[in-house]
Image (cartoon, rainbow, N blue to C red):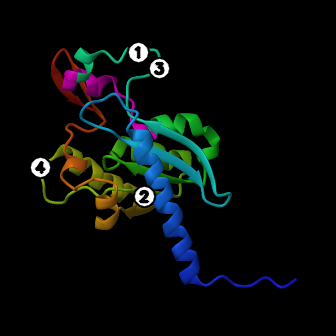
Amino acid sequence: MARTKVSAAVRRKNQEKWDARYLDLAKLVGEWSKDPRAKVGAAIVNPKLGRLIAVGFNGFPSNVEDDVRRLEDQKLKLTMTIHAEQNALIFAGKEARDCDAYVVGKPVCSMCATLLIQAGVKRVIAAEPRRGTASKWDKAGLLSIEIFREAGVEFRRLTEAEMTRLGLDADSATRSLPPSGTIFVEGDEVEL
């Protein structure tokens, strides 16, 4: 039986359909976060198998209480929080190799970018950080794009239409400060 060739246009349309579905899933999972200011979700997908591997959302580690005081204390919260991408990668384990990562809620920070690269993720779909701002989050996000490129990981930014459909805007998606890689020791900010 002869196999018919699928046109590039049909493949692209199919990819767009599945990208939208996985972005919707990452958005849904992000809503599970108890963080009142940041709802970030991630989905790790094996595109060859068309199979969801793992999901994650931002929050405190397992068995650590989501105490309101901790969540309202920005410095403490950021020191204790595990990011959505990190959570998803922990659950995916070795199965993350050659997968796509869908991230909704914030741009990918440089710490998460390094973990995605090291895990073997081949494609990342997320909000693009803003250029020309003083925001540490934007700077970390721009560094992420640079190291994705260097490592051969495809980065696809969310389009304006996708951002609107997901209920995001560029400013709210990048407002949280400071990014991962910053810890607080006795009230002093320390960059890692």
Considering only vertical position in the picture, is 158 above or below 78? below
Task: From the viewer's perspective, tell me whether residue 38 is left or right of residue 3.
Answer: left
Read off the residue under disc 3. Answer: 62
Q: Position of residue 116 (x, y in %)?
A: 48, 47
Within-10-Å neighbours for mark 4: few <14, some 14–19, many 20+? few
Task: From the viewer's perspective, tell me whether residue 70 is left or right of residue 13.
Answer: left
Judge whether residue 114 is colored magenta: no
Write the start and end of the magenta stretch as one range: 72-85
- Disc 3 or 2, which lies upstream in sequence? 3
Read off the residue under disc 4. Answer: 134
- Disc 1 or 4, which lies upstream in sequence? 1
Is label 2 in a helix, a strand or a loop? strand
Determine the CA span between mark 3 and mark 4. 34 Å
Residue 153 in view: no
Is label 3 in a helix, a strand or a loop? loop
Read off the residue under disc 1. Answer: 64
Type of amino acid under label 2: Ile
Within-10-Å neighbours for mark 1: few <14, some 14–19, many 20+? few
Type of amino acid under label 1: Val
Type of amino acid under label 3: Ser
Read off the residue under disc 2. Answer: 125
Is label 1 in a helix, a strand or a loop? loop
Task: From the viewer's perspective, tell me whether residue 3 is left or right of residue 89.
Answer: right
